[in-house]
Image: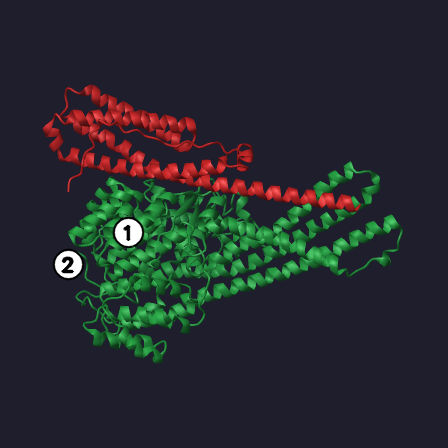
């Protein structure tokens, strides 16, 4: 009887420690996932603001750029693609497919906007338009905010992924439904003339 | 009961709570010991055919084994949970599945709750706490969680923000703020820990039962009796664990219920609008989902919520909150329990209100003074003030403060208020505040910002410089309260960089002004805690004498502010310090115009670790010193608030000055 008792107690202790351990990992991963999802919502707010600004920008530019219909259409199309990618990503922050799609769409939008602003250089009247200047400045400041929020999101994703991949969490993470989260990289084309704010 | 007394009381109550739980654990040890003895005796008697009389009732070794195991299990379980909740409010919100609302959200429903929380925080003089939305919860409920004001969060159900109107929301938020200000939250988190420990005990009994059932099946019949004993023990542990849990919940519920009446009463006091909180409670009574919580995790935190999350039977023993009708009737005596009638009248009232259209273009900025009355037109911008009123206001915002804060938020220049809710620009506003007036120093500081935070941040800082420098002094602290809530949205890495940048900026600054110093100190102390550093809230000083040096330094510095010369300052110092200990009055020579900020920071740190009663004496002395010349400027009042807040004692806005469109002192 003695040996059975001891074996059972040891088994029970091991089981309890294991359960605690798994619960601990689970809770930590939940907290970290929560953190990066919250971080994404900060990007989301800024992206939405940007998607709202772009039609105004295009509307303003339209009056001056009669011969650049194609560029304007491209911007609007890129904006619409990014908008739906953004919605999909907001529904599943960290999801690799959604994040890559958003990253592609955003990079495309940046490219289209860059081209628009470059072409706009050739229209001094447009450049001097107050509305245009205000919109451009707002766009730049929103981009700065996106960049910072993105950095915060990527930090949070990295710390989640690291926790997830460290042994022994890596054994349970998959079983508990914690998949790898995807960083958000947005390329900003080099040739893009970023409107400089002068002081 | 003032703020300090209720903080003290909360701490004492926490002690009693622990004593209760220790008693419960001792009872459980005794119970489990008895079960083990009986089970082993029963098993032994059948195997060896010995008479049950031979059973030894008192076996010190066995008792020790049982006691150690129970204490280990419960202690381990509690410590584990407490460690898990070390992150404070944020970790509780995460446990309950909350989503942090971005402070700059533009969704109208989210915006409304964010505004209500922001106004309440400014009225109370605390940093704006992050708001977590429980998306999957259709019931009307809310909670406040955290260890201190610094890591507090407000959690709120989707059902709450969608079904309640602004007044009712304000009532709920005021109720939660009362928990924050009364020091209830720390006790609440501890309670989760202890409950979890006892729960683990019952859980272990369950595991042993499963394990031994398996063991009995595997082993031959010759060991069956031993396994039988283990099954008996396991069942005993489950039963006693469950009974323990029952009593633990009973204790939790009874402690919690008292705090709820207090919070309801405080909510009425904060908003002086009994209709708000009563309306919210009535809506719970009328709502389809009531205040029920869907999340399985919510039970352990049930005492943190606004209202009961289960339907309890008539005895209500385990209810963490008093009965709804009782709570409503304490606030609104005429209420007869007809919830549906309320929802109808509410609907009509809403229509009427929309027809009336409240005058949003209200007169200018109201002028208020301590005692919280609007100043008559034409009164001087310096005004006599009673230090006692200043102290009495701490932690107890009044309805005037809430109204004032609403107007205040409206009057903060809009771009600034918006930027303060964006993490990126909020940082830059802080940097701009710390910029030196001299261009050379400022260029050096901007280079630091550019190096640490990037060129775009430096440009943004420059952009905010004129706004920040011309900001009405009354807005500086409120803007900082908003900033603090926003900055909680940084990642840990981003915060570390931010912290280093701030330190570097202050080091580069040639002339730190006292107000700037308090702002920076308050900001970093608060955010350090939010990001998990220095979370300890231990009281290290229960007597004031070891702090004599620190108190004298602080009062001497404050006495010099707002006085013309050293003699006047010395008088103010003697008046202030005399209220603590007349023997310290000979320290008046400490009054100087230059002092070491590091020394002041160290002093504040130690004072922060003193008991609430001591803080009260120090703040009273400070108030006397500041008001000694019978005149308080906006700067002095705001300085007092900033200083008091860096000691974790939130002061409602104390304001006296003409509206901002007139000439202001800057």
Q: CA distance from mark 2 to mark 1?
A: 37 Å
Colour-to-chain, red = A
Q: How is the image coloured?
A: by chain
Question: Percent position (x, y) of residue B95?
Answer: 50, 45
Question: Percent position (x, y) of residue B424?
Answer: 29, 43
Question: Percent position (x, y) of residue B259?
Answer: 49, 60
Could you tell whether B662 is left or right of B533 in the image? left
Q: Nearer the viewer, residue B329 or A3?
A: A3
Eyeballing the image, is B58 above or below A185? below
Residue found at x 33% / y 37%: A45
In the picture, the quarter occupied by the N terminus of chain B is bottom left
Q: Residues within 10 Å of mark 2 (few under 14, many from 20)?
A: few
Eyeballing the image, is B104 above or below B172? above
Residue found at x 11% / y 33%: A128
Please give the chain letter of the residue carrying mark 1: B
Mark 1 element type: helix
Q: Colour of chain B?
A: green
Marking on residue B504:
1
Eyeballing the image, is A39 above or below B253? above
Marking on residue B662:
2
Question: Percent position (x, y) of residue B367?
Answer: 23, 62
């Amino acid at each position: 009887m003695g040996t059975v008792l001891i074996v059972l107690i040891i088994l029970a202790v091991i089981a309890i420690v294991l359960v605690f351990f798994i619960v601990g990992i689970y809770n930590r991963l939940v907290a970290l996932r929560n953190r990066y999802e919250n971080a994404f919502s900060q990007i989301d707010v800024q992206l939405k603001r940007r998607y709202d600004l772009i039609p105004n920008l295009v509307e303003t530019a339209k009056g001056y750029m009669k011969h650049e219909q194609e560029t304007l259409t491209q911007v609007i199309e890129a904006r619409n693609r990014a908008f739906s990618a953004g919605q999909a990503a907001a529904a599943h922050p960290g999801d690799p497919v959604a994040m890559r799609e958003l990253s592609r769409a955003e990079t495309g939008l940046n490219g289209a906007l860059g081209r628009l602003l470059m072409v706009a250089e050739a229209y001094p009247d447009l450049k001097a338009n107050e509305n245009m200047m205000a919109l451009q400045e707002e766009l730049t400041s929103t981009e700065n905010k996106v960049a910072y929020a993105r950095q915060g999101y990527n930090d949070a994703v990295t710390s989640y992924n690291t926790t997830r991949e460290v042994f022994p969490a890596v054994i349970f993470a998959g079983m508990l439904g914690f998949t790898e989260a995807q960083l958000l990289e947005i390329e900003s084309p080099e040739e893009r003339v970023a409107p400089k704010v002068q002081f | 009961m003032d703020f300090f007394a209720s903080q003290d009381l909360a701490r004492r109550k926490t002690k009693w709570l622990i004593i209760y739980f220790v008693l419960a654990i001792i009872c459980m040890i005794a119970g489990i010991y008895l079960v083990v003895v009986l089970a082993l005796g029963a098993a032994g008697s059948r195997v060896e055919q010995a008479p049950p009389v031979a059973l030894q009732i008192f076996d010190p070794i066995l008792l020790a084994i049982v006691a150690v195991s129970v204490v280990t299990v419960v202690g381990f379980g509690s410590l584990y949970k407490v460690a898990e909740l070390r992150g404070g409010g944020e970790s509780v919100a995460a446990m309950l599945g909350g989503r942090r609302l971005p402070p700059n959200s533009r969704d109208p429903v989210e915006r409304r709750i964010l505004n209500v929380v922001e106004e309440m925080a400014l009225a109370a003089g605390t940093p704006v706490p992050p708001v977590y939305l429980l998306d999957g919860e259709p019931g009307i409920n809310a909670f406040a969680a955290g260890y201190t004001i610094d890591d507090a969060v407000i959690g709120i159900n989707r059902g709450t923000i969608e079904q309640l109107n602004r007044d009712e929301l304000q009532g709920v938020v005021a109720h939660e703020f009362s928990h924050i200000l009364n020091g209830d939250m720390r006790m609440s988190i501890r309670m989760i820990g202890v409950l979890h420990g006892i729960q683990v005990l019952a859980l272990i009994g369950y595991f042993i039962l499963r394990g031994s059932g398996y063991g009995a099946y595997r082993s031959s019949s010759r060991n069956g009796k031993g396994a039988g004993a283990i099954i008996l023990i396991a069942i005993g542990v489950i039963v006693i664990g469950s009974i323990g849990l029952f009593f633990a919940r009973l204790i939790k519920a009874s402690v919690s219920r008292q705090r709820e009446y207090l919070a309801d009463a405080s909510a009425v006091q904060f908003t002086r609008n009994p209709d708000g909180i009563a309306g919210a409670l009535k809506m719970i009574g009328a709502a389809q989902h009531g205040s029920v919580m869907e999340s399985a995790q919510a039970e352990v935190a049930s005492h943190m919520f606004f209202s009961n999350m289960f339907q309890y039977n008539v005895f209500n023993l385990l209810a963490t909150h008093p009965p709804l009708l009782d709570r409503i009737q304490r606030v609104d005596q005429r209420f007869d329990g007809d919830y549906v009638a309320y929802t109808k009248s509410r609907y009509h009232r809403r229509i009427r209100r929309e027809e009336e259209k409240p005058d949003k273009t209200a007169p200018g900025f109201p002028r208020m003074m301590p005692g919280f009355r609007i100043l008559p037109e034409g009164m001087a911008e310096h005004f006599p003030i009673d230090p006692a009123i200043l102290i009495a206001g701490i932690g107890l915002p009044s309805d005037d403060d809430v109204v004032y804060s609403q107007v205040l938020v409206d009057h903060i220049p809009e771009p600034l208020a918006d930027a303060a809710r964006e993490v990126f620009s909020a940082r830059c506003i802080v940097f701009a505040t710390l910029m030196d007036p001299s261009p050379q120093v400022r260029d050096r500081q901007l280079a630091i910002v550019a190096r640490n935070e990037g060129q775009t941040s430096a440009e943004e800082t420059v952009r905010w410089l004129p706004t920040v420098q011309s900001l009405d002094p009354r807005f500086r602290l409120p803007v900082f309260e908003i900033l603090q809530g926003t900055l909680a949205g940084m990642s840990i890495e981003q915060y570390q960089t931010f912290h280093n940048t701030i330190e570097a900026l202050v080091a580069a600054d040639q002339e730190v002004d006292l107000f700037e110093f308090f702002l920076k100190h308050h900001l970093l102390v608060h955010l350090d805690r939010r990001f998990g550093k220095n979370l300890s809230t231990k009281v290290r000083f229960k007597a004031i004498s070891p702090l004599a040096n620190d108190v004298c330094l602080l009062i001497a510095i404050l006495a010099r502010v707002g006085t013309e010369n050293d003699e006047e300052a010395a008088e103010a110092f003697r008046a202030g310090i005399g209220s603590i200990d007349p023997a310290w009055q000979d320290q008046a020579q400490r009054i100087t115009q230059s002092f070491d900020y590091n020394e002041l920071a160290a002093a504040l740190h130690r004072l922060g670790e003193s008991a609430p009663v001591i803080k009260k004496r120090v703040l009273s002395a400070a108030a006397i010193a500041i008001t000694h010349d019978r005149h308080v400027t906006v700067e002095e009042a705001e300085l007092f608030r900033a200083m008091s807040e860096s000691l974790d004692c939130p002061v409602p806005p104390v304001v006296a000055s003409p509206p901002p469109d007139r000439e202001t002192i800057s």
